[in-house]
Image (cartoon, rainbow, N blue to C red):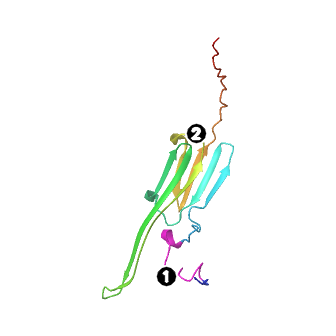
Amino acid sequence: MLMPSIFGDDLFDDFFGYPFGGYGWNGGSLMKTDIKDTDQGYEMTMNLPGVKKEDIKAELKNGYMTIHVSSNTNQDEKDEKGRYIRRERYSGNCSRSFYVGDQITQEDIKAKFEDGILRIDIPKKEVKPAVEENKYVSIEG
């Protein structure tokens, strides 16, 4: 049984860090997303602290936009004699998906990454009502 610690969720928080800079199982502040509805479209801002631009991939498929983030860090510290004091390696992946609609194309979406925040602008598209076609079965006789 893990006992609660004053520093985190359990006794081993200080010994075993989590990928993406020590965020817990629920992601902490990683990939927290705010979506704002404007007259022109939707403004999405996503927190990605400690992530590099080249580690972010945004994919649009079947009306869903998926943001993939991968991290692979290596922290080595040595003393004067070259013996290891600490070695830590983090490697992990996170992703989130949002339904943006079938009418949205890749060219419609604008994205910018700055200071650990990914900002994505998605325009509103007018949904055209489907024209209902009457389908009749032919009857012989």
Residue 5 in the image: state x and y as whole percent.
Answer: 60, 84
Assess disc 1: are there few (<14), some (14-19) or many (≥20) residues with their C-alpha within 10 Å of its C-alpha: few
Amino acid type of the residue that numbered disc 1 sits on in the rendered structure? Phe
Q: Nearer the viewer, residue 110 or 86?
A: 86
Residue extent of the magenta highlight: 7-22
Mark 1 and 2 residues: CB-CB less than 8 Å, in contact?
Answer: no
User: Which structural element holds mark 1?
Assistant: loop
Residue bearing the label numbered 2: 102
Vertical relation: 137 (above or below) 79 = above
Reply yes or no: does residue 11 show up in magenta.
yes
Q: Residue furthest bottom?
A: 81
| Label 1 or label 2, whichever comes before in sequence order | 1
Vertical relation: 69 (above or below) 129 = below
Task: Give the residue displayed 56% in from the left and 52% down from the top.
Answer: 97
Residue bearing the label numbered 1: 15
Amino acid type of the residue that numbered disc 2 sits on in the rendered structure? Asp
User: Which structural element holds mark 2?
Assistant: loop
